[in-house]
Amino acid sequence: MPNQDSSKLPNTYKQFVARFPELADCHERVAKAVDNAGPLDRKAQELIKIGICVGGGLESALRSHVRRATQAGASREEIEQAILLAMNTCGFPSTVAAWRWAQTQFERDQQDQG
């Protein structure tokens, strides 16, 4: 299982990892290798992953990467720009949906802090 607070992980993911631990370990090793494959810092990587999530329509993953980007030092404005950059490529509806998902994550993070 990834090195992060497991309470933040979706239940489906936790169930999958429990059922297929070897696959989860392989997935984690690939993720670490990709993260270390180039010069991008954690914040840049997370902002890029946010853009990928917009294109893929991946709500849960987008919210996870919003949280991770924030932890890596990205501001709300930087995260919103990463989402907005997808507009001409992925379309207005996808961008607006992703922006809403990010707002939901910002709100949850704020509740967790207060």
Image: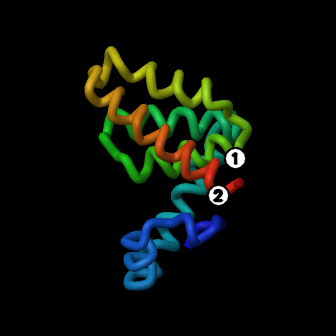
Location of the N terminus (image quadrant): bottom right
Residue at position x 60%, y 56% in the image: 32
- Residue 93 position (above or below residue 57): above
Residue at position x 73%, y 38% in the image: 73
Q: Position of residue 64 (x, y in %)?
A: 51, 51
Three-letter code for the amino acid on which mark 2 is drawn: Asp
Q: First in sequence, mark 2 or 1: give its number.
A: 1
Residue at position x 61%, y 25% in the image: 78
Three-letter code for the amino acid on which mark 1 is drawn: Gln
Residue at position x 40%, y 53% in the image: 60
Determine which of the numbered discs, if any, sits on residue 71 in the image: 1
Q: Position of residue 100 (x, y in %)?
A: 40, 36
In terms of depth relative to the viewer, which is nearer, 28 or 69? Answer: 69
Location of the C terminus (image quadrant): bottom right
Q: Residue furthest top?
A: 88
- Residue 17 position (above or below residue 71): below
Instruction: Locate residue 59 relative to residue 74 in the image: left or right.
Output: left
Task: Choose top left, top right, bottom left or bottom right for residue 97.
Answer: top left
Mark 2 lies on residue? 112
Q: Secondary structure at mark 2?
A: helix
